Image (cartoon, rainbow, N blue to C red):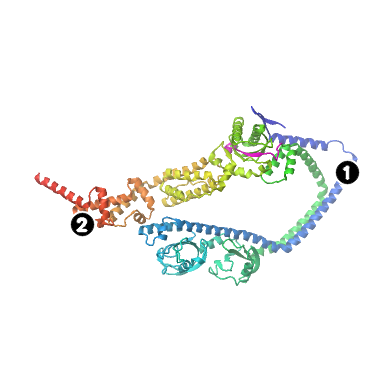
Amino acid sequence: MHNVNFHGEFGVYSAFSALELSDSIASRIKLGYTFFTKGGETDSMILRNQESKFMYRNILLSIVLSIVITLLVSSTILYVNFDNIALKQVYESDSNSLLQTSQEIRTITETATSLSFQIYRDFVISKLLFYDKPDIYDVQGSMAQLNLYRLAMPFIDSIYVYNGTSELFYVSSNNFQNGIQTKANLGDPGMVDILDHFQDYIPFLPVPRTFKSTNVSTLQTTTVGIYSYLCYDAINLNNSLNSAVVVNISESFFNKSLKKIANNRASNEFIINKEGILISTDGSNPVLSNYADKSYIQKIIANASSPGYLVDNVNENLSLISYTAPDSLGWRYVRTTPYTIITKEIRDMRLKTIYISLSILLLGLLISFFMSKRLFGPIDKVIRSLKTLEIEKRDNLQILRQNFLRNIMLGRDAYHPQVLKSKLTYFGSKITIDHPSLLLMVKIDKYEENIRTYKDQLTLLRYAIMNIGTEISSSTFHAEGIDMGDDHILLLLSAKEADFKWEPVDYTELLQNMQASISSFIKLSVSITVSPLQDEAITCFQLYKQLLEASYHRLFRGHGCIIWSDEIIAYRTKEYKFPSQKEKQLVDCLMTGDSEEAELLYTDIVNETSLYPYTVVHLAISHLTLTVNNVLTTINKNNALAFPLYLDAAVASLTHVETIEEINAQFIDVFKQLQKKLDEKRSSKHVELIKKINDIIDRDYANQNLSLNSIADELAMSSIYISRLYKQHTMAAITDVIQDVRMNKSKDLLLNSSLSVAEIAEKTGFTSDSYFYRLFKKYNGITPNDFRKQLKYENTLQQKGIEER
């Protein structure tokens, strides 16, 4: 067996060549085969072979008969129990489907709960909750914010914001008219009763109910089924609500979640509570129908805490009824499938299966009778080959030791400490399992690039890395290298002394020395992840997953880094909260084409995750990928852009990404190309938009309600967007331009009319004459009256000068 050598000051590093090893095995098999087949065979050997053939034929026939009998008995049993097996299979499929549906409903509930709490804490909407007479501008802004919340999630039917002091509802709805409504005229009287008896309802848990809704345009009245989530925390002294937020989810969305997973067996799905009340419609009865009197529902209710299935009549049809255990809401998910549909194919296949099985058995018996004599020769060769392979197996302890250690690290095998010690001794390992030890994970940097460069030689290079690491640590440790495949290997280091103590600075020196040697001898850069020092080597076998998770933080620390796994695992105790506000700012920047600001916001969000577990990093980048792609989709629709560049979904999975710069480059490239496209598209539109804004200001300057928001409403655009755009192109804010126009108009009236200052203030859109006085003096340095006197005096002097000339 040949070796590949790496020479240097640390000695000779050898790694096995897989190809040469295979050649050695092949030559030995050939030699063993020659040994067994050559030489003269005696008559006794021929006689023994004949006896062996006869014995083999008898054994073969016995085995075949045993198989035949077993198959017949098994077929009979299966035939008798086929219906039950089919029912169980359908139940397992239904159970998985129902559990998936339950998970979707729980996800919707969690989302609605989070949304109601977020609305309650929203600073803009809080004025509706706690001010008995909020300003009209606050109401408009709050209602716009409320509509944004509703439109952001398609399953939300409506949102109510209730002010207990004024007893007003602020409604954003899909079913009836939006706006401000009192208790008396609220189109949802059931909600008034719920809020009056709020003690009977648990906050953030869905309240299924129905109410009559009248369409304003068609005047048609329909029954609406919804699930309401109640959020409140302020209760008055008289035990009445001070304020509340109610999020209503459409029943149709629940039904859609139920049906989209349904199979093609004409199944019917619905939800009941523990009393047998219908929580979601089954297509024939409305929500809150009482199903408790149905026989199959009574059986489900009797099995109060476990999932299961039963066969019973449903609407006079024998059906399989599958149901789940009660979830956290106390709901149970039920699916009914007609029995005839389940067993139709079974009935057709029974007879075919019997005929086919009998044919195969008869044919097998016939063939086995004629072929038994011919089978002995090949089987004899196989036995000899197995003996040869067994010899080779004993000769290749290195390969077996690698498989043994790899299986322990992956958790495939587990051994008692004494058995493990015996195994290690058998394989020639010097690891002492009761001495202090640590585990190193060495990852090859730029792995994809190295695959293309070295191709089939990577296995050889991994052995070289193991040998280098073993040699460098040999002065203090007994070392064992383990090839885990792909881009990393493990080094198990067991101290030579039982009272071993080492400081982190000593670790660092050893690890840096190891990295430098690998780079020098085999021209590879590696990153190393280090476990804490363990009291015994046996505990190191349980640290592989911990090291693997910690090694992913190479994403932020870069190639050639040294990572301490206990530092990374400590991140698990930190609670991460996704910066939603920064995400909103990022979306606004992308919508306006501000790539530089978007890049800063994106970098801040990603860099914040570097001090959290890798799962947080993964979810944050996946979330940002989805957000940016949604923005690109929206921009493409709204601006008719031909922008084919989207973030690849593979970015979010981080499968082939080693450093954060690789991800950042893709995001930043999209940001810059988006800005370029938007700049090209919007250059002509911006001029027209600014002209429209100026025309509105010139037209409505006398209207006291003229403001940035009123202009945005008229143009059906975001106030933040038009404000930023206007200032970007004119270097002036819209509010300042409004004041300038009003001030210029007031000057003209002061000079060319006899109107009082109060009348001029009213005609130019100022809310009061006192405010007009203050603002006029701030702009011009003098009061309106002094300005009028001064202008008249100057005009008089000018007129006299003209007459004298």
Residue at the extreme right of the image, as rendered: 43
Task: Please indicate, yes or no, whether residue 267 appears anywhere in the rendered image.
Answer: no
Q: Residues within 10 Å of mark 2 (few under 14, many from 20)?
A: some
Quarter holding the N terminus? top right
Q: Please, what secondary structure does the residue beneath circle 1 have?
A: helix
**Mark linked to residue 756:** 2
Q: What is the span of residues highlighted in magenta in the rendered image?
A: 430-450
Q: Please, what secondary structure does the residue beneath circle 2 have?
A: loop
Quarter holding the C terminus? top left
**Mark linked to residue 48:** 1
Task: Please indicate, yes or no, whether residue 64 appears anywhere in the rendered image.
Answer: yes
**Callout 2, which amino acid?**
Ser
21, above or below 365, in the image: above
- The image quarter in which residue 34 lies: top right
Q: Residues within 10 Å of mark 1 (few under 14, many from 20)?
A: few
- The image quarter in which residue 295 lies: bottom right
**Callout 1, which amino acid?**
Arg
- Answer left or right for 218 relative to 791: right
Q: Position of residue 362 (x, y in %)?
A: 79, 56
The residue nearer to you, when weighing 646 against 305, is 305
The residue nearer to you, when weighing 89 against 486, is 486
Q: Let me know if residue 593 is in the magenta part.
A: no
Q: Residue at x 85, y 35 (%)?
A: 39
Q: Let me know if residue 443 is in the magenta part.
A: yes
Q: Position of residue 467 (x, y in %)?
A: 66, 33
